[in-house]
Image (cartoon, rainbow, N blue to C red):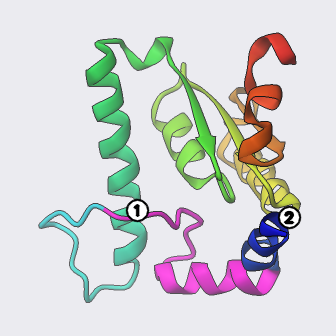
Amino acid sequence: QHERGVQAQYDTAEKRAFYAQVMGDGTSNIHFGKWDDDIDVTQEGAYGKASDAMTDYMFALATDLLAQNSSTLSYVDLGSGTGGAAIRLLSAHPSLTATCLNLCEAQNATAQQDAVAAGVADRFTVRTGSYDQAQALLLPENN
């Protein structure tokens, strides 16, 4: 029942259009933002810029904590939506690979199309499933 509720919330064209409008610039990256001084909240696209800033900030923190170069990392996004964060990171880090897990088939199809359009599809994988299925769907020994 919970999974159906999530799908109803995110996996319709109307809901995706709503979130793109709320973000102000058609972005598909709808998680929390990092509001730096250079983001003017009154400007169109401010929410999308703050989401991108959060993606970049969290990735930098992760690579710093691991004391590794991003060329040795694989990125996993649970509840990836349309893959906006993964595609952004793949575009910025040419040797990175990304695997996304998301419940919503329409969002996953959009993510795959966006990865192709961004030229990162060869390093991008999206799987349809829930958090409960993450281990079976994402670990290499299970694929």
Total number of numbered labels?
A: 2
Q: Residue furthest left?
A: 37
Q: Residue at x 36, y 66 (%)?
A: 49
Query: On the rendered image, what quadrant is the N terminus found in?
Result: bottom right
Q: Is residue 84 magenta?
A: no
Tell me where residue 75 sits by quadrant.
top right
Dot 1 lies on which element? helix
Q: Nearer the viewer, residue 20 or 116?
A: 20
Disc 1: which residue: 51
Residue 86 coordinates in the image, percent (x, y): 58, 43
Q: Within 10 angstroms of label 2, few (less than 14), some, or many (20 or more) residues?
A: some
Identify residue type, mark 2. Ala
Q: Which residue ends up furthest to the front in the rendered image?
A: 1
Q: Is residue 20 magenta?
A: yes
**Residues drawn in magenta:** 13-33
Left or right: 85, with 119 as reference point:
left
For the residues labelled 2 and 1, the Cα–Cα distance comes to 22 Å
What label does residue 29 carry, if any?
none
Reading the image, the residue beneath label 2 is: 106
